[in-house]
Image: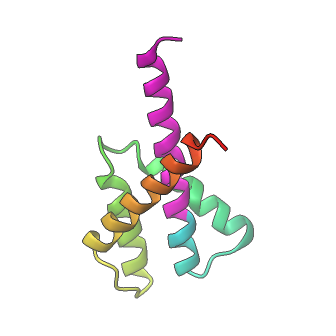
């Protein structure tokens, strides 16, 4: 495997875990649990393919929360998504 292939695979895994983490967070805000929470988190993966970059995930999370009467703006969701990405990167790239 080339370095470029490894970097692409790593980036794909980081984004997938990031999306799962933000989906779990948002789902809990929505009061979901168990299989409903897991299903909602999985929807984040699908939402990420609507357009390039994380904007589609931010829009879905912020919209879902707004529809539930939870006021969390795009900027706050973007910050949470950045934190989730850092957490995902740290988890996936740890050498422990």
- Residue 37 location, quadrant: bottom right
Residue 47 in the image: state x and y as whole percent. 43, 51
Tell which of 67 and 41 is nearer to you: 41
Residue 51 in the image: state x and y as whole percent. 30, 43
Looking at this rendering, what residue extends furthest in the left direction? Answer: 75
Relative to 74, 93 lies left or right = right
83 lies above or below 31? above
Tell which of 72 and 17 is nearer to you: 17
Q: Residue at x 49, y 46 (%)?
A: 89
What's the coloring here?
A: rainbow
Looking at this rendering, what residue extends furthest in the right direction? Answer: 34
Q: Residue at x 66, y 61 (%)?
A: 38
Q: Is residue 52 on the magenta stretch? A: no
- Residue 52 location, quadrant: top left
Q: Residue at x 49, y 22 (%)?
A: 6
Relative to 76, 96 lies left or right = right
The magenta segment is 1-23
Relative to 3, 36 lies left or right = right
30 lies above or below 12? below
The kind of secondary structure the magenta stretch mainly shows is helix
Q: Quadrant of the N terminus?
A: top right
Q: Residue at x 41, y 47 (%)?
A: 48
Q: Is residue 18 on the magenta stretch? A: yes
């Amino acid at each position: 495997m080339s370095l470029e292939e490894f970097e692409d695979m790593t980036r794909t895994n980081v984004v997938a875990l990031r999306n799962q983490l933000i989906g779990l967070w948002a789902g809990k805000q929505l009061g979901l649990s168990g299989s409903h929470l897991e299903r909602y988190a999985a929807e984040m993966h699908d939402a990420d393919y609507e357009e390039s970059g994380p904007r589609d995930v931010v829009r879905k999370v912020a919209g879902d929360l707004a529809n539930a009467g939870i006021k969390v703006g795009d900027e706050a969701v973007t910050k949470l998504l950045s934190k989730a990405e850092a957490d995902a990167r740290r988890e996936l790239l740890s050498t422990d």
